[in-house]
Image (cartoon, rainbow, N blue to C red):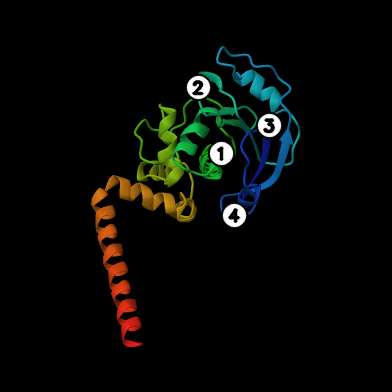
Amino acid sequence: MNAVNIALKVFELPYALNESKLRNWKSELFRISDIQHHEITEDCDLETWGYSDATASRMLECEVEADITIGLINAPLEDNYYMRRLSDNRALISLSEPGLFLQAEHIDFENFILRNLYEAVLAYKAYKSRLPSDDRIEMLHEATRGCLFDLSGSIADVVYSSASPSLCESCASILRRRGISTDLIHDVKKELRKLRQQAYYRWRTRIQAHPYISLILSVLVAFVVNLLAAFVFSWLTTSR
């Protein structure tokens, strides 16, 4: 199966991206063939100091050799969505509000970007090599499951599908019905398991959710330290 080629266009993000992680991400589904940096030349045309679909489309007009062109910007988008699918297999992703929640939860921006690429490419393949530009696609669901196709009515919910993204069985069933092979779905689920929040923050979140773990670890550490101290004291005493 040929991987879908994606071109990324970065519009003056205030965040430093790990472009190496994006370029080198191994996937059977897609590959990032190009990352370009552009200045923002269009004026905001929404009351929220954001960009409408019409303006976003003009920003992504440049010709690129890719199946899908996706822009990254730090500004609100139409209807306060964090990703707007546009015509001609283009989409614009906003890090404006999502970036605040990702930073607060110590989730890499690259995780958020990659989970959106998986969502976009699966939709592209499910709709016969066309990225749907309408507001709804069949896989989207209002329930927050940490799934690629969570609707995330509250933008704060993006942390659940960015810290450890998954593909729920309901979406997998729809994708199979739309012609996506079981093998590819299996590969996607396997790849998503590698797209996780850093281990330190995963452990910290678990400890905060279960305080008794912190208590047990504290007791164990204190016991080990006391044991080592007693051993060292005994060794120093007998070696004199």
Q: Secondary structure at mark 4?
A: loop
Residue at 59% in and 53% down:
25
Horizontal relation, residue 152 to residue 80: left or right: left
Q: Secondary structure at mark 2?
A: helix
Q: How far is mark 1 from mark 4, CA to CA?
A: 15 Å
- Residue 189, how many percent across, how many down? 44, 52
Residue at 56% in and 22% down:
77
Residue at 43% in and 47% down:
164
Nearer-N-terminus badge (1/4): 4
Q: How far is mark 3 from mark 4, CA to CA?
A: 34 Å
The amino acid beneath tag 1 is Tyr
Toward which corner of the image does residue 236 lie, by quadrant?
bottom left
Between marks 2 and 4 in the image, the one whose residue lies nearer the viewer: 2
The amino acid beneath tag 2 is Asn
Query: In front here: 106 or 10?
Result: 106
The amino acid beneath tag 3 is Glu
Nearer-N-terminus badge (1/2): 2
Is mark 1 in CB contact (under 8 Å) with mark 2? Answer: no
- Residue 123, how many percent across, how many down? 52, 38
What residue is shown with label 1?
Answer: 124
The amino acid beneath tag 4 is Met
Q: Which mark is residue 1?
A: 4
What residue is shown with label 2?
Answer: 80
Is mark 3 in CB contact (under 8 Å) with mark 4? Answer: no
